[in-house]
Structures are given as C-alpha cells and as structure tokens.
Image (spheres, rainbow, N blue to C red):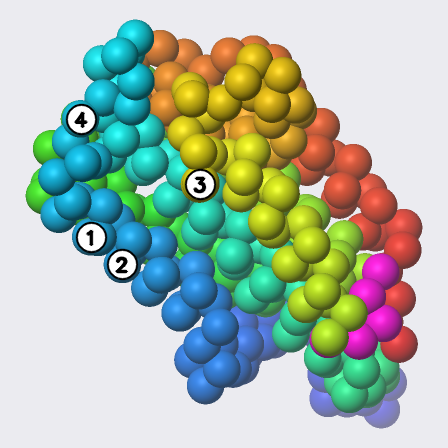
Amino acid sequence: MTSSAAISLPRPSGHSLRHLIVAETKLAYRVPVGLVLGVFIPVLLLVIFGVSPGFKRPINPHTTITFMTAYVPVLMALTLALIGLVSLPIPLVMHRERKYLRRLSATPVAPRWLLAAQVAVNLVLAVVAMGLIVGGAVLFFGVQAPADVGGFLLAAVLATASLFSLGLFVAAISPSPPVAGVLGTALLYPLLYFAGLWVPRQNMSAGLRHVGDFTPLGSAVQSLLNSLQGSFPPTHALVVMAVWAIVMTLAAVRFFRWE
C-alpha cells in the first residue's frame, strides 16, 4: 500500500514546468503587452529610423558613428526595458493579487516555478526582438555586424540579467498591478534617457554620461556599441551590469511574497 500510494502521489517535474510555460505563453499571447511593447515598437522604430535620411549621417562632427549604428544598442536597451519593467512584473503581481500564487503553493508545483516560466517566456520575447533589431539593421540598413561577437553576446546577457532582475524586484515590492505599472514607468524613462533614446550618449555632457555609466542601460549601450565597432566591452560597464543583476536578484528574493 505504501508503494502504491507513493506511485500515485503527484510530484513536480520538468513536465509540470513545461505546462506552466505553455500556460504563461498563452497568457502572453492573449494579453500581448510584451509582444507589442517589447517586440513590435522597437522593431517599428528601427524601420522608421532606417528609412530616415538623417540617420545615415554621423551623430557629431568628431566621430564616424552614424545615428543608425548608435541607435541599434539603444533599441535593444528599449526592448529589455519594456519587457523587464512592464511585461515581466505586472503579470506576476496580478497572479499574487488574484491568489493564484497562494493556490499554486498548495500543489506539488513550487510557486517559484511560475517565476521561472515568466522569465522564460519574456526571455524568448527579448531574444526574438533583439535578433530582429540586429538582423534588420545589418541586412537592410547598412549597419555592420558585431565585430566582437563574444563581447556583444556577453553584454546582451548581462544587460538582460540586470533588467530582468530589476523587473523581479518591482514585482516583489508592488502590492498591486497599478503600483507595479507606476514603479516600472518611473524607472523606465530615466533609464532610457541615460541609454541615449532621446539624446545619443555621445552628445551628452560629460557629467550626464558619467552618471549614465552607472545605470544598467547606460552600461549596456556602451558595451553593445563597443562590440559593434570591434572592441571588447569596457570592464567597468560589464561590472556595473553584473552588480545590478546580483543586487536586484537578492533584493527580489528578500522581499518577494507569494500572497
């Protein structure tokens, strides 16, 4: 009887995680916040910038970097910011508010697996969007392929980790979806400013650029642009992104509540 009971008792498995990923993917499709904000808008901006004649000229008289080349890392940063700060935290907070996490904790499936499923779904969106941005820029708009592929991939991974961890921290401390939306937006705009969305970082004052070097997106854009031009990302930029990722992950774990 003991053996029979043990066999019939449901246990969490990789199969359960796949079911969660499928369920969260369907939710992301029905409420396509990440798909629209994180994929469609950055790709649309890429097309708009690419067909604009002004984006083919250098960003200032002291460099040969064109606006188009400079904005490829910025659009990648925009993708990560929108997915990490909007698409990732809000569904998690909604699940908590609707007691879904509480009910899940009574099943053999650990609630933390829902975190893994959400991260996996949004990670796929981020990879697709960044692939479309880089591929579209290289194939259709005359941007050179990343000359330092290893440095480019490392910078992209660290940038993704830092923004996703920041999004998980927003989810951890937000008591409701509206609060998560406000916090995510409050972080979104200054981070995008220092990333160079409105003013290219190369045209910022030295002081603003120095402040931006300590933000995850400012460091990400600097690292990605260096890799596009053939040099390995600066060590301090990689360290800044790694520190953001570690600190925000630890803070998210510390403050996260399932109900």
Q: Which mark is residue 84?
A: none
Q: Which residue type does callout 1 highlight?
A: Val
Give the left or right position of residue 234, taking residue 75 as reference: right
Q: State the residue position of label 1.
A: 47
Front-most of 161 and 82? Answer: 82
Q: Which residue type does callout 3 highlight?
A: Leu
Q: State the residue position of label 3.
A: 197
Q: Which corner quadrant of the image does residue 9 belong to?
A: bottom right
Front-most of 210 and 156? Answer: 210
Query: Of the residues under marks 4 and 3, which one precedes in the sequence?
Result: 4
The Cα atoms of the two marked residues, 2 and 1, are separated by 5 Å
Are discs 2 and 1 less than 8 Å apart at CB?
yes
Q: State the residue position of label 4.
A: 57
Front-most of 193 and 122? Answer: 193
Please say if 145 is above or below 35.
above
Are discs 2 and 3 less than 8 Å apart at CB?
no
Query: Of the residues under marks 2 and 4, which one precedes in the sequence?
Result: 2
Q: Which residue type does callout 2 highlight?
A: Leu
SS of the residue under disc 2: helix
Give the residue drawn at x 55%, y 26%: 219
**Quadrant, the N terminus:** bottom right
The Cα atoms of the two marked residues, 3 and 1, are separated by 15 Å
Give the residue drawn at x 21%, y 52%: 48
Image coordinates of residue 223 in percent, x first then y, are 46, 22
The Cα atoms of the two marked residues, 2 and 4, are separated by 20 Å
- Write the start and end of the magenta stretch as one range: 173-177
Give the residue drawn at x 20%, y 35%: 55
Q: Which mark is residue 44?
A: 2
SS of the residue under disc 1: helix
Query: Of the residues under marks 2 and 3, which one precedes in the sequence?
Result: 2
Are discs 4 and 3 less than 8 Å apart at CB?
no
SS of the residue under disc 3: loop
